Amino acid sequence: MRMGVLPRAVAARVITGSVATVGWAVGTATILFTFPVLIETLARRDRLADLLLPLLMLIVVLAGIAAVVRWRRRRVVVIYLVVAGSATFVYETALLRSDPALITDGLYLLNRPNIALVVVGVAATTAITGILWSLLGYLVANAVILAVTISTGVEYRPGFGPTMVFAISVIAYLTLAGIQTSQRRRVPDFDRLEAETQRWSRGEDLSRHTTAAVHDTLLNDLSIVMTSSGELDERASERLLEDLEVLRGAEWISHTRDIRTVDVEDATLRNELMRMVSDFQWRGLSIHVTGTGSGIYRLSPSVAAAAVGAIRAAFENALRHSGAAMAELEVIYSAESATIMITDHGSGFDMSAIPADRLGVRGSIIERLQLVGGSAQIWSAPGEGTSIIMTLPVAEVVVPQEESHHQEMS
Amino acid sequence: MIERRHLALSAQQVDPLSWFTGTHVPLVFGAINLLYGWTLAFVAWRSHPEPRLQFAGVLICSLACVFVHVRTRPMKRRIGARGGAIAVSIASLGFVLSAIGYSGLTFAIETWWAPFGLGLVLASLAPYLPTRTLLILGLGSIVVTAPFAYWAVSDQVFRWGPVSTIIIIMSPAIAAVIAAATFSYAVVSRMLPLIEKRSETFVSTEGPLDDAAEQAERRRLAELTARAAPFIESVARARKVSDNERALAGQLARHLRDDLVTQSHVSWLDAVADASRLVVIDPDLRASKMRAPQRTALKGLLQAILETPGADSGSLLVELRAGEDGSTAVGISLDMELPEGRRIMHLAPYYLTLSTAVSDLEWNRDRFIKVSFNLPD
């Protein structure tokens, strides 16, 4: 059993993605609350005859948000920005043509759909992508305002609303990014602690085995001697000697060793990964590659080959089963290990629903890595995408990277 | 499908590690409110009969954010519904003061800072309260403040009808409630399945022992058998047992049994103690009953305490006692000179991780570190 704490990278992805969900909810609420304001305002100005077109455009924006929530793809959000931007243009033009005075005393009503453009971005998993999507929405909103000005000839001031919402989005993402950066410095390596606990548990098992062996052999042999009448027959004597051999051999303590050789061609893995990324992009899965650290590390040929095979299997799964058009590959090194994190934002799956005799993921990723001293952890749930973290032993640190602040303190 | 428990847990409860430095969120929101509110109050200074009310209202709303910050610091108990209600009440007071200040004045309600300020306080609670509590507090504050705000300013609003007026006044607060509740629900509903359904069969738990472990085990075996094995070998080869040898066999058997019992009682905590000056009191051998996540979390905290500058590691005491209900009460104490702020930030990640694996975790705030908790049976 492992601790109920997610790896920081996975937690950060969930939290940042949740901020994007907030954008969808706020966008929906903003449009919904615009309906009564629109109806009441036009009624007070005796313009109810002009209500239908702006009302329909608000419904188009709402439908667009629903599509983004349903599919959560980059392409769908781009289509949303185009469609909702066009609907916003029609909405504002129709209202200004109906009553140009709205530009002075009804700006709040006019710029509501602009806010929905700013807050509805893709399900960003990093602060920078969240900010970029908000910026794109903000630019579309301002382009719409410019187009309305040109189309109607009315000098259109966008008002505080969209700028304020954009500023809050940026501050929220930056605050989140600041927290996550601070976390990376301060949160200890619980994976290492868990590994120590597991190692100790294995040592405990071994100690129990040793205790049992000594009990079943030496302690029993001493009892035989204590209860002996003076002579030991041949069988008893042989048994005592066999027991001593069992203790001398102590085979339960021995273990096989993985002898690693260092590959002199240290660019093999990098080149192989780049070829793979290109191959999958051609087949329809965009792969975003990132990584941290300034050091240079070398993996043994067997570890590198296992890593490439496991990564390829993970991307194959994402391409075939997740429905995602994009996946991320992040590589992080330390002096002892290389951590490779692969995430997709696709359909995900229920791990517990996979039959025990299915060897796909287990054979192609987990056991492949285990054979070279690595490990793999998989997080997935229906509708929540999939994260795979692979850990591989580093054979040699060619150039070490700078120590983190946390490591310096401890 | 909305699950009830997703509404009853906060983002902080599901993943406390993500929020131990997140207490800065309320401070950021408080600063935004101060900047925005005071700018508007300053701009409208001359047109207000009582401009000080706006400055006071802004300050009170920002103080509500500071209150949330203080109540959500790492070692504090969870802020809870009561703490949230206090924060929202303080913000509502600031809102009402502002409304009183604006009553009788014509102004643009679209740019009124007070609903925005109330919204920021509600939003600052998002990581720390469950969705259900956020909705109750948020809607409660809107129900209380909206009629008052409408009564105070509606007579001076000519551009908008009554429905639009109330929507415009309260839309920042409503948006904040929706945003906070959505955020809390999204984090909990996405993170909980990942924590609960994380692979256990897929995780690689087997691995080769390292050299040190193998050597230590061989050394232990050699120590256990050092006296008895040569004796048995000599008897086996001679095939004769004298009275003296029978007596010696009895002595060796007694010693060996004692050694085996002692060895079987050595826990992982004793191993930690061997490597430091930690004192362990565990008469009921409860350490060996701890589950792996509890061991990892406690070991992490102990290591962090031992590595804390200014800590007298010789005074670190860990005591485990069995409870009548099968649980284990654990107490940790240590003499420490480090100021509380630095001590908290150093130990917070370990403390919060421990809180995911144990129950009734308590932190004492004096110059000693005193941590106590229960391990469920």
Image: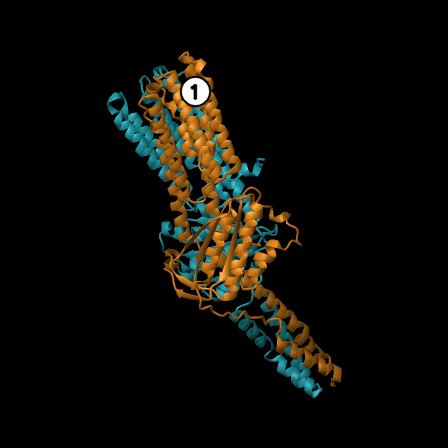
Q: Is residue A13 left or right of residue A254?
A: left
Visible residue check, residue B290: no
Instruction: Indicate whether A205 appears above or below A1.
Output: below
Q: In x, y percent, where is residue A263?
A: 47, 68
Name the subunit of mark 1.
A
- Colour convention: by chain
> Residue B291: which quarter of the image?
bottom right
Q: Residue A93 at x, y = what percent?
A: 39, 22
* Disc 1 element: helix
Quadrant for the N terminus of chain A in the image: bottom right
* Residue A243 in sight in this render: yes
**Toward which corner of the image does residue A209 lie, by quadrant?**
bottom right
Quadrant that contains the C terminus of chain A: bottom left
> Which residue is at the front of the view, A285 or A31?
A285
On the image, numbered disc 1 is attached to which residue? A37
**Looking at the image, residue B109 lies above or below residue B135:** above
Which is more toward the observer, B51 or B256? B51
Drawn colour of chain A? orange
The residue type indicated by label 1 comes to Val
Chain seen in cyan:
B
**Position in image of residue B323 (x %, y %):** 58, 52
Q: Is residue B228 left or right of residue A11?
A: right
Residue at image x 65%, y 83%?
B233
